[in-house]
Image (spheres, grey):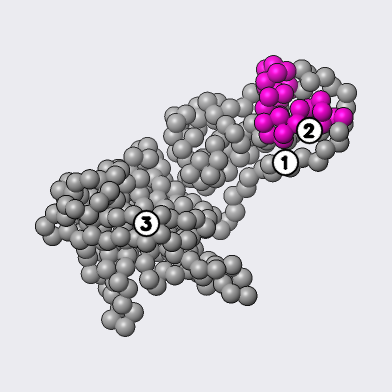
Amino acid sequence: MLRPYDLLENILIDVEKDIQNDINVDILAGKYSLSNGHLRKIFRFAFKQTLAGYIRSRKLAASLYDLLNNDMNLLDIALVYGFGYEQSYIRAFKSEYGVTPGDLRKSGKIVKVKPPLYLFDDNKMNDGLLFGPDIVMIPYFHIIGKSNKIPFNDSLTLAPKAAIQFWENERKQIKNVINPNVYIGLTCNINEEKSYSEYISSVQVDNLKHIPQGCSKYTFKSSLCARFRYIGQHHYYDIDRERAKEMYSKICQFAYNEKEKYSLLNNKVYFEKVDTGQYDGIYCQMEWFAPVIEKKL
């Protein structure tokens, strides 16, 4: 099975190579021995858009040359780019560009084209991919979980172990869980002087009324955050010290880049989020969030 970088890179290449052929999600899923659903989820997680929508946009963008540079009729253009029917092409075109193909020919209107996607070396990890950051607003939420006091020097080793321990044991005692498939590992109470922090292995809950004995609560305040997205060719239990270290080294490139518009506030609180329901037996997904503030000019 291909590593995530190679899989997604090959898919992007296939779309461009077969832009005038019968290329779709089913064909790509079959070629790479993935289910249609899993391929769609991976692509959407990586690029924040649907694979079917991306293929359609790229076909429409390619069709503009034939539409504006020769006298091909709309049916022939539709067939060349795999739309099957003239009306299917016209509907997709108007949805994409806000004008029909015929009206575009007459008006000379300038339309915005979706360019091809690319992966970069900065995205690549040993057996995974890291995307971001996206700047997102996170609404406040509550968590209940197991609190762990962890020294900075041991955090990349002890935090993953604490996560697995909680997931297999304490989480079963927690009620009012919003999504039982989603794990949240939140780091807070960061004490730089004493070189330790509090790591809460947790799940999100809709209220803090029922806290099992031995568990802790925390409310994450609404914050503008940087979000990084990770895809790895392994089980989510295998997000170990080496993988976490590689991931955080890339996040630090953003944190210490003076040209970035936002400053990362990861010295106050940050959290990772793993949707275990997205694991397909091959690829796992994880998100990492930390508050940011806009830099003053």
Q: CA distance from mark 2 to mark 3?
A: 45 Å
Horizontal side of 217 relative to 240 (left or right) equals: left
Magenta-span inclusion, residue 278: no
**Which residue corresponds to the image point at 54% horizontal and 36% vertical from the top-left?**
50
**Pointer 2: what residue?**
64
Q: CA distance from mark 1 to mark 3?
A: 37 Å
The magenta stretch is 78-106
Q: Nearer the viewer, residue 22 or 47?
A: 47
| Residue highlighted by disc 3 | 140
The N terminus is located in which quarter?
Answer: top left
Q: Which mark is residue 113?
A: 1
Q: Main secondary structure of the magenta part?
A: helix
The reply to whether dot 2 and dot 1 touch (C-beta < 8 Å) is yes
Name the residue at 56% across, 35% down.
51
**What residue do we see at 40% from left, 51% from top?**
286
* Label 1 Cα crowd, 10 Å radius (few <14 / some 14-19 / many 20+): some
Q: Nearer the viewer, residue 214 or 210?
A: 210
Sequence order check, earlier mark of 2 and 1: 2
Q: Taking 75 as reference, is 207 above or below it?
A: below
